[in-house]
Amino acid sequence: MRQIKLAASGIVLAVMAATMMWAAGRPATVKGYVIDSSCSFTKALKKPISPECAVACAKAGSPLVVQTEARTIYWPISSSQPAVGQNDKLLPFAAQKVTVTGMVYDKGGSHAIVIEKIEPAK
């Protein structure tokens, strides 16, 4: 019986450690285009149509995202509580290719990034 309790404790500790590692995110650098999230999905765009289009959508409330050339989408998120939108950080780069550095989180096939630094891609 004692061996079963020890094995169960080991499993619980392993699950807790894996959960804490996921919750912490990982530092990463992502290169991609700042694009309106709606256009990325509904129009299957590989890159933005124009800065004016992305800005108009963002000002209407649509979140901007960073889409890589492989078409992976990174949702910019806030690390503050309560969370705040990230469009203000992305608007100056609308429709541009950028390099974003920050903490990346993956969950259920979705990807998010807390932006620490964003600049035009070289």
Image (cartoon, rainbow, N blue to C red):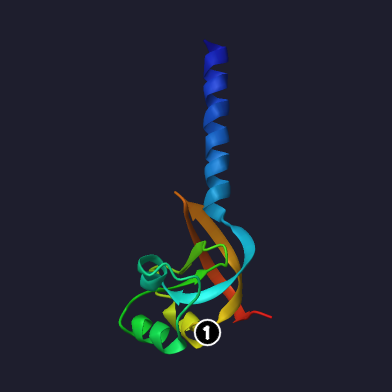
Tally of numbered discs: 1
Q: What quarter of the picture does the C terminus occupy?
A: bottom right
Q: Residue at x 56, y 41 (%)?
A: 18
Disc 1 marks which residue? 93
Label 1 Cα crowd, 10 Å radius (few <14 / some 14-19 / many 20+): many
Q: Residue at x 52, y 18 (%)?
A: 5
Q: Position of residue 35 (x, y in %)?
A: 46, 76
In this view of the protein, which residue sits in the foreground, 115 or 53?
53
41 up-or-down from 93: above or below: above
Percent across and percent down for residue 68 are 56, 67
Nearer to me, 31 or 114: 31
The quadrant where residue 30 appears: bottom right
Q: Position of residue 47 (x, y in %)?
A: 50, 75
Identify the residue shown where x is 52% and y is 84%. Answer: 93
Q: Amino acid at mark 1?
A: Phe
Q: Residue at x 35, y 81 (%)?
A: 57
